[in-house]
Amino acid sequence: MRKIGYARVSTEDQNLDLQIAALQAAQCEVLFQDHGVSGASMTRPGLDQAFGYLEDGDTLVVWRLDRLGRSLSHLVNLIEELKRRTIHFQSLTESIDTTTSGGMLVFHMMAALAQFERSLIGERTKAGMQVARLKGKRIGRRPALAPEQREEALRLLNDYSIEEVAARFGVSHRTIRRARKERDALYDTLDTVVHPIPVI
């Protein structure tokens, strides 16, 4: 079983000496590193190389958890990817080692906390959207057509094709089709209300 080390610093003026010394002391055979790369970055050349080099049964070793990822959910996703590939993980500072039952327990606790974090973010997002709606603010993307443009576009469909109308307003043909579909659905609803189906 090989130990593969990974070290990272966020800025160019920081150095990797402390991390490299710790990883060498942990008997890592090969070291990969990212210098001046943020932990929040989704593309890290050194980490990508490490993941490409790792094989079944290897252990990825970092000096500290935040060297691998900045958020709990990001960390859990990376460790779960290693787990799917039957690769172990070790963090020296936090004494996390997924080759042990205690290390796996800590990882499962991290996963539970990451799920809790995602749930809280979702709840806060929904609450913020609800408050915005109550204040009369529009949620989502701005419509491609203003209300008066929409009405004019629908009128023009009587004489022109969808593609011609879309080109005239500088929008996609899907926008015009969607507007027509929503209008037709509204007319169907109104027709049902005005002329209800008799109950026999």
Image (cartoon, helix red, strand yellow):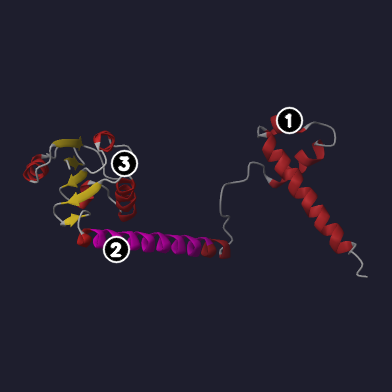
| Relative side of 140 to 44, left or right | right
Q: Earlier in the sequence, mark 3 or mark 2?
A: 3
| Relative side of 5 to 139, left or right | left
Region in magenta: 104-129
Give me the disc on residue 41: 3
Q: Which residue is mark 1?
A: 163
Magenta stretch encompasses residue 120: yes
Alpha carbon of mark 3 to alpha carbon of mark 2: how far?
A: 24 Å
Location of residue 58 in the rendering, given as x and y in whole percent from the top left corner: 21, 42
Under mark 2, the amino acid is Met
Under mark 3, the amino acid is Ser
Alpha carbon of mark 1 to alpha carbon of mark 3: how far?
A: 41 Å
Task: Identify whether 120 is placed above or below 142.
Answer: below
Residue visible at 30% across and 61% down in the picture: 108
Determine whether the residue tagged by mark 1 lies in a helix, strand or loop.
helix
Instruction: For label 3, count other residues whose C-alpha is less than 10 Å away and answer few (under 14), some (14-19) or many (20+).
Output: few
| Relative side of 181 to 14, left or right | right
| Pointers 1 and 3 in contact (C-beta within 8 Å) | no
| Pointers 1 and 2 in contact (C-beta within 8 Å) | no
Residue visible at 20% across and 57% down in the picture: 100
Q: Which residue is mark 2?
A: 109
Location of residue 128 in the rendering, given as x and y in whole percent from the top left corner: 48, 62
Residue visible at 19% across and 41% down in the picture: 8
Secondary structure mostly taken by the magenta-highlighted segment of the chain: helix
